Amino acid sequence: MDQVNNQEATQQLALNGGTPVRPKLLPYGRQFIDDEDIESVNAVLRSSHLTTGPKVAEFEARFAEEVGARHAIVVSSGTAALHSATIAGGIAPGDEVITTPITFVATANCVRFQGGTVVFADIEPDTLNIDPNCVEAAITEKTKGIIAVDYAGHPCDMERLEAIADKHNLLLIEDSAHALGATLNNRKVGAMGKLTAFSLHPVKHITTGEGGMVTTDDAELAAKVRQARNHGLTTDHRQRDKSNDWHYDVVELGMNYRLTDFHCALGISQVDKLSKMLQRRRDIANAYNAAFKDLEELELPVTRPGANPSWHLYVIRLNLDKLNVDREVIFKALRAENIGVNVHYIPIPWFTYYQNLGYPKHDWPVAESSYQRILSLPIWPGMTDEDVHDVVVAIYKVIDAYRT
């Protein structure tokens, strides 16, 4: 990364009427689609199968191979993946499930869908992942499971969490919506925990448009996830066609979380490019690390020994004691420069729905204080070196304007 030109960094802020760094907004995340992806979808549209056809099983097999799991079950969204995992794991009314307050709300909502109680445990101050010590402290006789979130693409301390789950006989679900392609001590995300849930939304590492995936090594859990995504039916139409039989049973209350063949065709094409797209994300993260390492106003993401994050997000934390404004002003100033920064996430207990359930504020000091300082910078594989340079210029421009 070239050094930022002093003139670039000292121009009048766009927020105050100056010229923006970029003429158009650079989003924080975006899909990367090429002609091969488009043709893969077109081929299915020209075929005789639009949904629940051969591309579904093909994508599941390819995904399972990629993450090193025995089973992969594709569903209609990342939320559907989490919900199917809680159904398969037997979460029921009265059960407590421990998770992090700093995640997208679907992580907690999937417990509520099953009538369970969400228990929030605070996070680690370096990775912003759930703190295993806080998890263990939150366990009660009603605790049934743990949902660990690989925040921003950095794997959780799964060895500690697995040990805690084994000790207390708890279900461990890994919410890896951010972490496809990440590894921890040479173990791939998707092959740890009892069940792992992925998102295939356009801002994620690969996309099917909308979509999600559940992986597991447990054949019984895999069968339950498949039933959960298809109305609780004991067989699907392909199995019935193969056996020339029309009979089926409904053994539980399931959902319609199926994904189409053309979505899955896109997923197959995308997963074949995963390695290339992961490398671009890592290159951008390395460029940011180099560019910002001497800025005292920023706290950069941490990578723990043994972890190889997949960099769904690049989250900085503002050192507000070195700035004369708060995070909201920095956010608006960067947006005015057409840098699409974002905030991931508002603590879940602060939302009206959870406040109405009686959750307090200020019970998770690391999570809540971190929330006041975090900003996600743009990072996605279609970004050019010029895009990265624009982000760096804008950060220096805004920080220079507001440092104490």
Image: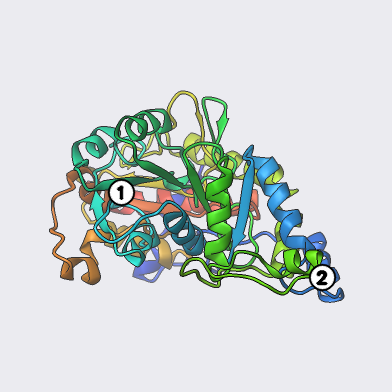
Could you tell me residue 280's position as x and y percent?
Answer: 64, 44
**Residue drawn at x 64%, y 37% as measured from the top left:** 68
Q: Which amino acid does label 1 sit on?
A: Thr
Mark closest to the chain's N terminus, 2 or 1: 2
Could you tell me residue 57's position as x and y percent?
Answer: 73, 57
Which residue matches tag 2?
Answer: 44
Side of 221 relative to 396 (left or right): right
Q: Is disc 1 placed on a helix, strand or loop?
A: loop
Query: In this orientation, which residue lies closer to the viewer: 345 or 386?
Result: 345
* Residues at circles 2 and 1 in contact by the CB criterion of under 8 Å: no
Which quadrant of the rendered structure holds the N terminus? top right
Which residue matches tag 1?
Answer: 100
Q: What residue type is labelled 2?
A: Val
Query: In this orientation, which residue lies closer to the viewer: 392 or 379?
Result: 379
**Residue drawn at x 21%, y 63% as measured from the top left:** 350
Side of 113 relative to 272 (left or right): left
Query: In this orientation, which residue lies closer to the viewer: 236 or 62?
Result: 236
Could you tell me residue 190's position as x and y percent?
Answer: 55, 42
- Against 256, residue 124 (above or below) is above
Q: Quadrant of residue 159?
A: top left
